[in-house]
DNA sequence: ACCTGAACACCGTTCAAGT
DNA sequence: ACCTGAACACCGTTCAAGT
């Protein structure tokens, strides 16, 4: 990649991060290009669609969550481990306005670059789910997909209602009661 | 109201109903005016903002739900009554794409005409909640607002993931496990 | 190779001009 | 009283023309 192209790419990502942080996942792409000091076509050259740009912004978040799952999978209390992880996912997802909705919407669409991130997130969840089920602490008819759906729903509420972390945890707690074996 | 104005109002509502049914609560107002065979300004004269139009479309739905609650409140099984009502709300809400989100978003905003509908919905829920709590079947730390939030979250999932009614009911069931006393 | 911005087809909202 | 549509300020997306 040419040096100027590299510079542009970075400006776009920087502008996008602050813009999405402020206005959510539906932030204006025009506005991002403007803030980045770059032509609109340049943004499209680097990121052919909105999801491609989002994916890049969210990559580190997803990586962190996968890492957390890897650590928690060897925890001594599998149910608590799952619940902790779910809270992390909810917190991380409600960080950007509209992200919960984007995730659920793109989950079925294999074309979207968010699809890959979501399914790897689902896999991280699957491992924690299996452990909790083996310990007979979690209902057997649950899988990672259920977990992502439910946690997204909580993140969505937290996002829209501006829930404080404590209330978010309470909702999660309520939900876990229903998932216990 | 002048006869032609009355006619226009009805054309707008008719067009809006089919448009919102097809494209969700964010359907184009321009498109609605076009389909109604009416100038864009006429739509705005009758409905100064989107919520005012939505409220009119949804009024009958809300009324039905209030009526259902009134009947269910004297049911012999209060917990089951609450669950049935919640399923009705979820079904009715996921009928229009984006409605769950609109309801939660506008719930805090006393300006919005949807606010009134939501708070009367909350009151319907409150009665059912109290009954279930008096029968010691429902946790004491729950109120109608929690119920609306949770049911909206389920409706939102049902909407976005295209859930079949059976899966929606399963989610609701899971949730109720957590709410039981 | 890469960048630019005009062009196109859309929005929501307002308001002067018309009947 | 009521209706109309042009005007304004925005979108996302594409692509010919420029370096």
Image (tube, coloured by chain):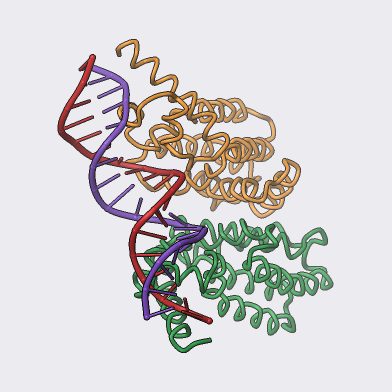
Chain colours: A green, B orange, C red, D purple
- Which residue is at 49% across, 36% downward? B121
Q: Quadrant of residue A151?
A: bottom right
Q: Residue at x 70, y 62 (%)?
A: A110
Seen from the viewer's position, the closer of residues A69 and C19 is: C19
Q: Compared with residue A131, is residue A169 higher up or lower down, i.e. above or below? A: above
> In the image, B72: left or right of B170?
left
Of B71 and B151, nearer the camera is B151
Residue A53 is situated, as x and y percent measured from the top left of the image, at: 52, 70
Residue B66 lies left or right of residue B154; in this view the side is left
- In the rendered image, which quarter contains the N terminus of chain B? top left
Is residue A91 shown to the viewer in this render? no
Quadrant of res A134:
bottom right
Q: Viewer-proximal residue, B71 or B149? A: B149
- The x, y position of residue A76, in whole percent, is 74, 82
Residue B86 appears anywhere in the view: yes
Tally of marks: 0
Q: Position of residue A142 (x, y in %)?
A: 77, 60
C1 sits left or right of B3 in the view: right
Is A6 above or below relative to A48? below
Q: Which residue ends up furthest to the bottom in the rendered image?
A: A3
Percent position of residue A146, x then y: 71, 59
A2 or D19, which is in the foreground? Answer: D19
């Amino acid at each position: 990649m040419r040096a100027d192209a590299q510079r542009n790419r970075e400006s776009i990502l920087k502008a996008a991060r602050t813009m999405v942080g402020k206005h959510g996942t539906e932030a204006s792409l025009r506005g991002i290009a403007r803030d980045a000091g770059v032509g609109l076509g340049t943004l499209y050259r680097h990121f052919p669609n909105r999801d491609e740009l989002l994916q890049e912004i969210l990559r580190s978040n997803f990586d962190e969550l996968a890492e957390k799952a890897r650590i928690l999978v060897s925890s001594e209390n599998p149910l608590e481990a799952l619940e902790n992880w779910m809270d992390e996912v909810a917190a991380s997802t409600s960080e950007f306005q509209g992200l919960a909705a984007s995730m659920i919407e793109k989950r079925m669409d294999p074309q979207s670059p968010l699809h890959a991130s979501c399914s790897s997130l689902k896999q991280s969840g699957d491992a924690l789910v299996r452990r909790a089920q083996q310990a007979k602490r979690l209902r057997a008819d649950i899988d990672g997909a259920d977990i992502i759906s439910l946690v997204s729903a909580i993140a969505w509420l937290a996002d829209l209602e501006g829930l404080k972390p404590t209330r978010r945890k309470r909702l999660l707690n309520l939900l876990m009661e229903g998932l216990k074996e």
